[in-house]
Image (cartoon, helix red, strand yellow):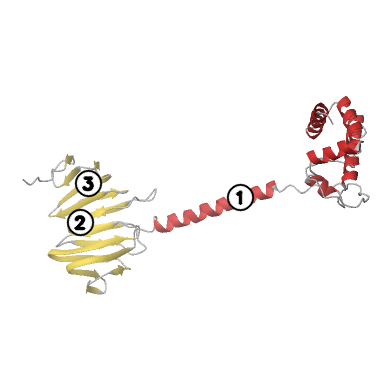
Amino acid sequence: MSAAELSRFDDLVSRYLDDTLTDSDAAELVALLAEPSWANRFLELTRLNSEIAGLLAAPVPDAAMVELVRSDIEKSHAGAQSASSGVRLRIVERTPPRAATQPTLPVPRARPRRRKPALRALAWAAVFLILAALAGIYLSDVWRPAGKIEVAAVQGEVYFIDAAGQTLVTGVQRLSKAGKLKTVGKASTATLVLGDGTRVDVGGNSVLATPSASGSPRLYLEDGSLKSQIVRQPRNQSLIFATPEADAVVKGTALSLETARHHTRLVVTEGEVLLKRRADGAEILVNAGSHVLVAPNAKLVASPNDPAPQHR
């Protein structure tokens, strides 16, 4: 074989594998494959692929494989390729020499069922399960009912008063029914934690009425003072701090509230609070950094908070 002949043969094999043989090229390749030297060259350049391995019941010896290729080329370009062959032959793996055997005819394989719809349905089901789990975690951890109240810490004399009487609060406990929390003395304090994580610090000499565990998120400061860090509330629900003079409706903010002798003072440090005056139903939106005084004959206006004193 000359270099030109080798180059030409390799080019014909490459075109065969790419399915770009012309009629004249196909005739030339078929004639060359009849010679053992070119047949061996063809086997060296190609390997039997998985299509033939799956279609043939027995291993194909080299000689039979070359005959199959020649027959495939002739039928393809003569327009007489039978429907039973189905798949174009591709040689991608060289098999070791074996004793000549008669290859069985290719048997068409049944087309596998399409599983895309089923896989798509499983994927959507997995997405829904993940979303449901996340929603459950979110609702259980973030949107727990604010009506549940727990005494997290006390200092000094703190009492819980309900229909059964007055009980001294000495440590952490759950307030499972409606009642009043009373701190006695200026140094006495109580820290409450609502079910949604809202924190309420009750000051000294204060009386705070609490709802039952199943009641609405409403705290009534009868007397004294409190400070609160409120967790953002769910949509269509607000936490209400009430006094004899006004209602403070909050969605999520930081505030302090004081009431005594027909006066209520609201100070907002974060977020915003809607303050409603009980006497005439007047409302004012109090933003962070402002305060409002509700008192007889006083205008309902928001004023800037006093700056923190600077120590020299």
Identify the image quadrant of the N terminus.
top right
| Residue at point 19%, 62% (across, down) | 207
Q: Look at the picture and state if 253 lies above or below 27.
A: below
Residue that sits furthest to the left in the current view: 312
Q: CA distance from mark 3 to mark 2?
A: 12 Å
Q: Which residue is mark 1?
A: 123
Give whichever of 157, 110 is nearer the camera. 110
Looking at the picture, how far across and down is residue 144, in whole percent?
Answer: 39, 58
Identify the residue at horizontal 64%, vertical 47% (top origin).
120
Q: Is residue 198 left or right of residue 7?
A: left
* Secondary structure of the residue carrying numbered label 3: strand
In the rendered structure, are the residues bearing label 1 and label 3 in contact, judged by CB atoms less than 8 Å apart?
no
Instruction: Residue under label 3, please give it.
Output: 268
Q: Nearer the viewer, residue 125 or 5?
A: 5
In-image side of 162 versus 81 (left or right):
left
Q: Amino acid at mark 1?
A: Ala
Q: For the C terminus, which image quadrant?
A: top left
Q: Amino acid at mark 2?
A: Leu
User: Is residue 11 rendered to the left or right of residue 24?
Assistant: left
Residue identifier under label 2: 226
Q: Kindly indicate the quadrant of the structure image that contains residue 74.
A: top right
The amino acid type of the residue labelled 3 equals Val
Q: Comparing marks 1 and 3, which lies closer to the viewer?
A: 1
Q: CA distance from mark 1 to mark 3?
A: 48 Å
Query: At 82% across and 50% down in the image, what residue appears?
Result: 96
Q: Is residue 241 visible?
A: yes
